[in-house]
Amino acid sequence: SFILFSGMIACSLILVSCSSSLSMCWLGLELNTLGFIPFILKDNSKGPSESSVKYFLTQAFASSILLLGILSASDSLGSEAESMNLFVLLALFVKLGVAPFHGWVPSMAEPLHWWVLFMLLTVQKVNPLIIFLSQSWMPKFMFIGVCFSVLVGGIGGICEVRLRKILVFSSISHMGWVLATLFLSTSLIVLYFVSYSLLLAAVVAVICKLNLQHLVQMSSSNLSVGWGAAVFINLLSLGGLPPFFGFLPKWMVLEMLVLEGLYSLVIFMIFSSLLVLYYYLRMAFSSFILKKMNWTFEEVSYLGTWSTSLSLFSLGGLIVSFLF
């Protein structure tokens, strides 16, 4: 059955990618929502059921606003069409979980399985981003979304101790960076989002393998030195610490923003990124530095090999940084 629902999500991605009208994009978004809800309900318990209801109601609300904007824009001209365009923009912000419309994401994240959360933070954001790329938007409101997202993503995760919510607020911050690239380059958007998805997959793979839920568990669990190093490297890379690979996409975004003369936005994004890096450093030090490591060898599984490969991918930034 999950093959069927995965196919629905894949079909929605193809439909939105190939659509030239917002009406067909709306249909693709609805297909995507219906295909994702069964993944949330994978565990038959109260928590995922509540999360599925929150997700459905939020997506239905955003879809209603989007449909209103699409129908009204077809009969409007000038300033009226621009106001309807704002409705579409707000609907996509809600679907992306961009601040200040992010409240539904942390509230539903806690009961989710780790890989379902990964899908929520990556795969479910692809369709709205494709629509963003295919349309022209009002820069003023886009900048508001960027600033709110990077700031809320930085501040929101500082006081969190649950790993899922930390990754959620980090995702909100990264979405701010992705939105900032909409004015710059399509290839840069793809590079940034793919890099973030790979690094997040590496972190989720290790956390899922070790069954970690809480920040305290990272310092108290009996990690082997290999797993501890994998967590340490991938967290620092995901946080954007130079010269790890995760820093390179951010550096490219900042460089292009400087070329556009957006100096105040660059300073604001750097400051907010430091807040995100702070709680990733806290996680990394808890997992590798501030504990006694278990210096033993473990049987290498497929998951361990894959996570190690992504860790080497993160370390690749060390090599690339010397080329620049």
Image (cartoon, rainbow, N blue to C red):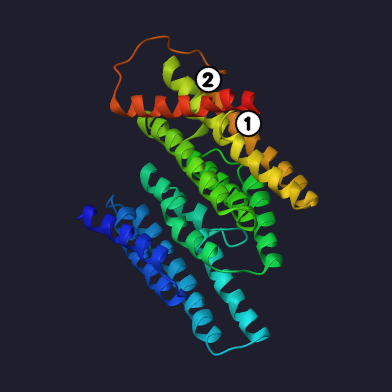
200 or 323, which lies in front?
Answer: 323
Would you name the residue on which mark 1 appears? Answer: 241
Would you name the residue on which mark 2 appears? Answer: 288
Residue at the outermost front position: 323
Identified by mark 1, the residue type is Leu
Identified by mark 2, the residue type is Phe
The residue drawn where x is 51% and y is 76% is 65
> Residue 212: percent from the left, percent from the top?
42, 32
Number of numbered discs visible in the structure rendering:
2
Q: Is residue 86 above or below residue 11?
A: below
**Could you tell which of marks 1 and 2 lies nearer the N-terminus?**
1
- Examine the image and state in which quarter residue 14 appears: bottom left
Residue at the outermost bottom position: 75
- Examine the image and state in which quarter residue 28 appears: bottom left
The residue drawn where x is 64% and y is 86% is 80
Q: Is residue 309 visible?
A: yes
73 or 287, which lies in front?
Answer: 73
The residue drawn where x is 71% and y is 66% is 140
The residue drawn where x is 60% and y is 57% is 182
> Residue 71: percent from the left, percent from the top?
49, 85
218 or 229, which lies in front?
Answer: 229
Query: If the image is split into quadrants, where does the N terminus sit?
Result: bottom left
Numbered tag placed on residue 42 in the rendering: none
Q: Is residue 171 above or below residue 88?
A: above
Given this view, does label 1 or label 2 mark the residue nearer the observer?
1
Q: Is residue 223 visible?
A: no
